[in-house]
Amino acid sequence: MRICSNSREQTPATARHFLRFSVVGAIGIAVQLGALALLRRADMDYLLATVLAVEAAVLHNFVWHERYTWRERAVESGWESVARLVRFHLTNGAVSLAGNAVAMRWLVGELRLPVIPANLIAIATCWLLNFVLSDRVVFTRCEG
């Protein structure tokens, strides 16, 4: 039987994970903004383009968080990785999709901000919550 903890690690480990999470997230921002710009250039509605761009970034970030950010918490099977991906989508994906969609609707739809700057604001609003969810729910340390 496997036992998974909430990873109550020492501060240096948490700080290292936060730094790595931020690096991966910064690259994910480039993925998201690039996808958003391409989709908007194809004349896609800004909200649909946002959702698809967020999904591209979520998938990118998951792969790199598993291989880089929390690599010492590796899983033993493909099914465990799939379970993590599901948890990642239910936590980070949900926060990012809902947060971005709501923020973009308000920032672009109501305040009339340009799409790319508005998306950067939306991303920033989800960042810290996504780290906590990743560290405490998705990429937990398992033993046994």
Image: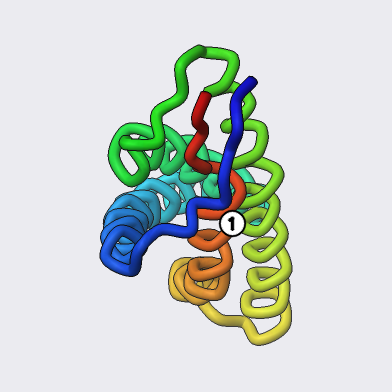
Would residue 135 be found to the left or right of residue 86 on screen? left
Residue 94: where, in percent of width, then height?
70, 51
Residue 19 found in image quarter: bottom left
Residue 128: where, in percent of width, then height?
50, 70
User: Nearest the camera: 10 or 20?
Assistant: 10
Is residue 42 visible from the viewing direction of this image?
no
The structure residue drawn at horizontal position 60% and vertical position 33%, both measured from the top left corner, is: 3
The structure residue drawn at horizontal position 59% and vertical position 14%, both measured from the top left corner, is: 79
User: Nearest the camera: 105 or 14?
Assistant: 14
Residue receiving disc 1? 133
User: Nearest the camera: 94 or 33?
Assistant: 94
Residue 95 found in image quarter: bottom right
The structure residue drawn at horizontal position 33% and vertical position 69%, both measured from the top left corner, is: 11
From this view, report whether residue 126 is shown above or below residue 2.
below
Which kind of residue does numbered mark 1 sit on? Leu
Colour style of the rendered protein structure: rainbow
Looking at the rendered structure, the secondary structure element under dot 1 is helix
Is residue 110 visible from the viewing direction of this image?
yes
Residue 71: where, in percent of width, then height?
32, 36
